[in-house]
C-alpha cells in the first residue's frame, strides 16, 4: 500500500483541512493499492496563497538557478525510475516493460529539454525602438489526467518552473500516487517553499476551485473535452489564461502506394498502445477501398498478437484499462459499433478468458466503419480500432477531418512528398509520416475541440510567458 495522508504546500507536508480520502485501485488486481487525501476548497486557497507569495522571489531568480533545480529534478526522477514505473503500472496497467521507457523515460527526457532550453533561449529581443521581454505569467494551476500521468505533469510543471512561474498541481484522482512521488523528488531537489504545491482531490471540487481562484493567473489543463469545456467556462469569470490539451479521434491514412503490411502493423500498434488510452492514438485507420479486405485481414492478425495479461509479467503485450468505469464505457462502445453495423473482426465486448480479475478489454477491430458512426466520431479511450475504406485522396482527407477533434494523425506512403502534401491538409496539431517518432522538442497540442495552446519544447515554455514591450 502506498498511503499519502498529507498535501504538499509551502515546502511542507501538511494535513488537509478536510477529512476525506480517496482510494487508489490497481487496474490489474482491482484491489486498493494506495490512498490520498481528498483536498478541499480551503486547501486550494492555502496552496494558491503559498504560490502567490513565492512568485515574487522565484520569478526574479537567475535562469541558471531555475535550470539547476530542473537538473536536480531530472536526477531525482532518474534515481527513482524503477519505483515510479512500478507505481504507474499498478495504477494504470501499462506493461512494466513499456512503463519504464514511456511513462518515466519520457518525463526524464522532457525535463532535460528544459534544462537545455534555458541555456539556449533568450528572453528578450529588440524590435525597432522596443525592448520585448518575456516574463512568467504568474501562479499556474496544472490539472492533469491519468493516462500518461507523470508525463502530463512534467510537460506542465517543468516549463512552468523554467519560465519562473509558481505551481499548484492537481493530479488525476485516478492515478495520483506518482504525483506524490514527484513532490517528494522536488522537495529533495530543494524547490523553494511555495514554488511547487500539490493538492489532490476531485475535479469538481479541487479542480474547479483552482480554476475559479482569483489569484491563479493561468490554468494548464489536460483531460477530456467535456471537462475542458467546463474549465473554460469557469475560467472566463476571471479572464485567466487557459491552455487546453483535450481528446482526440486521430486518423492514420494509408495511401495506395504505401507498404500495406508495415503501415497496418504500425497503425494497429499505435492504436493499442497503453490499451488505447492515448490522446493521440490513431484510432481510425483509413485505407483505399480496393485494399480494405487485405488491410482488415492484416489488422486482425496483428490484433491477435496483442496478448492480454498481468502487466507486471513479461509475456503481456497489453494490460487492462484503468478502471471499471472505463471498461464499461469501452464495452458499451464496442456494443454500439456492432449495433451500428460495423463488422467486428477481432475482440469484442466480453471479459477476456482466463482473466477474471482486472479491467481487461479484448483488443478489438472493426471493419467497414463509415464516418457517421458513433465509433468513428467519439473518443473511446480503449483498445478499439475502426477501419474505414475511402475512395480517393480527397475522400481520405475529408474523412480524416470529419470529427470535432484535431489532435494527431498519420500518413503512410512510399512518396514522402506526397505524404507531406496530405499531412498539410489534415486539421491536426501533429502528423507522423511513415511512423515518424515522437519528438520532445516539437510543439504538441490540438486544433478544434482537441484544445488550444501547445506543450513541449520552446512552444511549451512560451505558454507560461507574458510579453512586455518597453519603448525606448
Ligand atoms: P478528465 O477530463 O476526466 O480529467 C482530467 C483532469 O481534470 C483530472 O485531474 C480531473 O480531476 C480534472 N477535472 C475533471 N473535471 C473537472 C472540472 N470540472 N474542473 C476542473 N478539473 C476537472 O480526463 P481523464 O479521464 O483523466 O483523462 C482522459 C482524457 O484526457 C481523454 O479525453 C484524453 O484524450 C485526454 N488527454 C489529452 C491529452 C492531450 O495532450 N491532448 C493527453 C492525455 C489525455
Image (tube, helix red, strand yellow):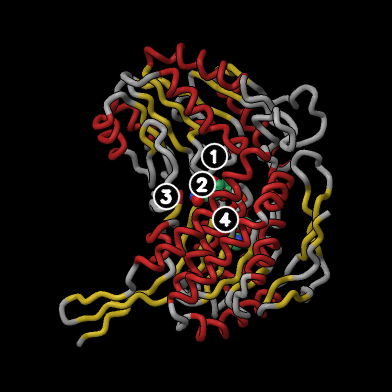
Please, what secondary structure does the residue beneath circle 4 have? helix
| Marker disc for residue 227 | 4
Q: Are marks 2 and 1 in contact (CB under 8 Å)?
A: yes
Depth check, mark 2 against mark 4: the one in front is 2
User: In the image, is the residue at mark 2 within 8 Å of ligand 1 by its beta carbon?
Assistant: yes
Q: On screen, 78 above or below 51? A: above
Q: Of callouts 4 and 1, which one flags the residue occurring earlier in the amino acid sequence?
A: 4
At 56% from the left and 65% from the top, the residue drawn is 142
From the viewer's perspective, tell me whether residue 242 is left or right of residue 177.
left
Q: Which numbered disc covers residue 247? A: 2
Gap between marks 2 and 3 measured at Cα: 9 Å
Name the residue: 69% across, 34% down. 319
Q: In which quadrant will I find the C terminus? A: bottom left
Secondary element at tag 1: loop
- Residue 224's place in the image compared with 296, above or below, is below
| Nearer to us: label 3 or label 4 | 3
Residue 289: percent from left, percent from top: 38, 16
Q: Which residue is mark 1?
A: 379
Q: Nearer the viewer, mark 1 or mark 3?
A: 3
Left or right? Give the position of 43 relative to 345: right
Q: Count residues near mark 4 (Cα–Cα under 10 Å), then give few for <14, some for 14-19, many for 20+.
A: some
Amino acid at each position: 500500500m502506498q498511503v499519502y495522508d498529507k498535501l504538499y504546500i509551502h515546502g511542507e507536508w501538511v494535513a488537509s483541512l478536510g477529512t476525506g480520502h480517496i482510494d487508489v485501485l490497481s487496474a490489474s488486481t482491482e484491489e486498493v493499492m494506495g490512498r490520498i487525501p481528498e483536498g478541499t476548497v480551503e486547501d486550494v486557497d492555502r496552496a494558491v496563497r503559498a504560490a502567490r507569495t513565492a512568485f515574487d522571489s522565484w520569478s526574479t531568480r537567475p535562469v541558471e538557478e531555475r535550470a539547476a533545480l530542473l537538473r536536480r529534478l531530472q536526477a531525482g526522477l532518474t534515481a527513482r525510475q524503477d519505483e515510479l514505473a512500478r507505481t504507474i503500472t499498478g495504477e494504470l496497467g501499462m506493461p512494466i516493460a513499456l512503463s519504464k521507457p514511456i511513462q518515466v523515460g519520457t518525463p526524464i527526457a522532457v525535463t532535460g529539454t528544459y534544462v537545455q532550453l534555458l541555456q539556449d533561449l533568450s528572453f528578450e529581443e529588440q524590435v525597432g525602438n522596443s525592448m520585448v521581454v518575456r516574463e512568467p505569467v504568474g501562479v499556474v494551476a496544472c490539472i492533469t489526467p491519468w493516462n500518461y500521468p507523470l508525463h502530463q505533469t512534467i510537460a506542465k510543471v517543468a516549463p512552468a518552473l523554467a519560465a519562473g512561474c509558481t505551481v499548484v498541481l492537481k493530479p488525476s484522482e485516478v492515478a495520483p500516487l506518482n504525483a506524490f512521488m514527484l513532490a517528494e523528488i522536488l522537495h529533495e531537489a530543494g524547490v523553494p517553499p511555495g514554488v511547487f504545491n500539490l493538492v489532490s482531490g476531485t475535479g469538481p471540487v479541487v479542480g474547479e476551485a483552482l480554476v475559479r481562484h482569483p489569484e491563479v493567473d493561468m490554468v494548464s489543463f489536460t483531460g477530456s473535452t467535456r471537462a475542458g469545456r467546463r474549465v473554460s467556462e469557469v475560467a472566463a469569470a476571471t479572464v485567466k489564461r487557459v491552455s487546453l490539451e483535450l481528446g482526440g479521434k486521430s486518423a492514420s491514412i494509408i495511401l495506395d502506394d504505401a507498404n500495406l503490411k508495415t503501415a497496418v502493423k504500425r497503425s494497429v500498434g499505435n492504436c493499442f498502445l497503453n490499451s488505447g488510452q492515448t490522446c493521440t492514438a490513431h484510432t481510425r485507420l483509413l485505407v483505399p477501398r480496393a485494399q480494405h479486405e487485405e488491410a482488415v485481414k492484416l489488422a486482425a492478425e496483428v490484433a491477435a498478437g496483442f496478448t492480454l495479461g498481468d502487466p507486471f509479467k513479461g509475456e503481456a503485450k497489453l494490460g487492462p484499462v484503468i478502471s471499471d468505469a472505463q471498461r464499461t464505457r469501452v464495452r458499451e462502445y464496442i456494443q454500439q459499433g456492432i449495433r451500428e453495423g460495423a463488422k467486428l473482426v477481432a475482440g469484442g465486448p466480453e471479459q477476456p478468458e482466463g482473466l477474471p480479475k482486472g479491467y481487461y478489454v479484448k483488443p478489438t477491430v472493426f471493419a467497414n466503419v463509415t464516418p457517421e458512426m458513433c465509433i468513428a466520431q467519439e473518443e473511446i479511450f480503449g483498445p478499439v480500432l475502426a477501419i474505414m475504406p475511402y475512395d480517393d485522396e480527397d475522400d481520405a482527407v475529408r474523412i480524416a477531418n470529419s470529427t470535432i477533434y484535431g489532435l494527431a494523425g498519420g500518413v503512410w506512403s512510399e512518396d514522402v512528398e506526397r505524404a507531406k502534401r496530405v499531412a498539410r491538409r489534415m486539421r491536426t496539431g501533429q502528423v507522423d509520416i511513415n511512423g515518424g517518432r515522437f519528438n520532445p522538442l516539437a510543439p504538441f497540442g490540438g486544433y478544434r475541440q482537441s484544445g488550444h495552446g501547445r506543450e513541449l519544447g520552446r512552444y511549451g515554455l512560451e505558454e507560461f510567458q507574458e510579453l512586455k514591450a518597453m519603448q525606448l
